[in-house]
Image (cartoon, grey):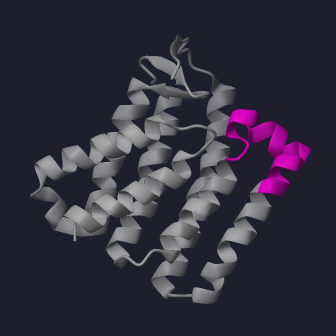
Amino acid sequence: MNIKSVESSFSAISLLKELARKSIHIGACGGALFLIGKELIILELLFLPTMALGFYISEKIEFFGKNISFGNRRKWGGILLAVGLSLVMAAPVDYEVKKFAIFTLMIADVMAALIGKIVPIRKVEVLGAYKSIGGSLAFGLGVVIALKLSFGMSADMMVWQTLVTILFLEFYEFLNWRGIDNVTLPIVAMVIGSSWWI
């Protein structure tokens, strides 16, 4: 695995692209959480093909694909997000665990991307994706927020479990080859949530 240091200067255009992409990301996660909460099974089944088709078409349209994409290394991120959210919907786990998996994508992943653009501190490129110290710290804080929103007060009493949860999820967020973390993060979050937090 090749990890190389890259320049970490601020770019307003890059931040605007990230904001546009993450707005769609948050909307997709919010939609999935709504469907799960309301137990709209038929719409849950239609979620994957609808979202995948939408993301595929957006990559082909000049306005969306060329303006908010960062090139081939991000091309499949949206489709993989649809796959990851569909796996959460289909998983035979408690509602709180599904919430944690979705909030990890909706809050922690988004915080990492945006803070990584604004205050990267130090940035590296790994597997074609950019990672930063600022983004990683924001991701860890986002995981804590996701734990609190999903499991409530029990998240206060498990310091070691919280730290291990953050480290595991940081590892899978770090290994982000063409958006594959949109699938690996919710899977790992569900495994950890079911094992330690229920």
The residue most toward the left is 157
Q: How many marks?
A: 0
Q: Is residue 125 above or below residue 114?
A: above
Stretch in magenta: 56-76
Percent position of residue 93, x then y: 37, 76
- Tell me what residue is drawn at x 51 percent, y 23 percent: 1
Q: Quadrant location of the C terminus?
A: bottom left
Q: Is residue 146 left or right of residue 162?
A: right
Which sits in the foreground, 193 or 8? Answer: 193
Image spot of residue 183 (x, y percent): 53, 54
Q: Is 64 part of what is drawn in magenta?
A: yes
Asked which quadrant contains residue 50, the reply is bottom right
Q: Is residue 108 left or right of residue 195?
A: right
Residue 30 visible in the snapshot? no
Side of 186 relative to 168 (left or right): right
Instruction: Determine if residue 167 is in view.
Output: yes
Q: Quadrant of residue 18?
A: top right
Compared to residue 19, the image places residue 94 above or below, namely: below
Per the picture, the main secondary structure of the magenta-coloured stretch is: helix
Q: For this rendering, which residue is in front, 64 or 123?
A: 123
Q: Which x, y percent locates residue 105? A: 48, 54
- Residue for point 49% across, 28% down: 131
Residue 185 is one of the magenta-drawn residues: no
| Residue at (53, 15) in percent of width and height | 8
Q: In the rendered image of this protein, does residue 193 appear above or below residue 89? A: above
Could you tell me residue 94's position as x and y percent? 34, 78
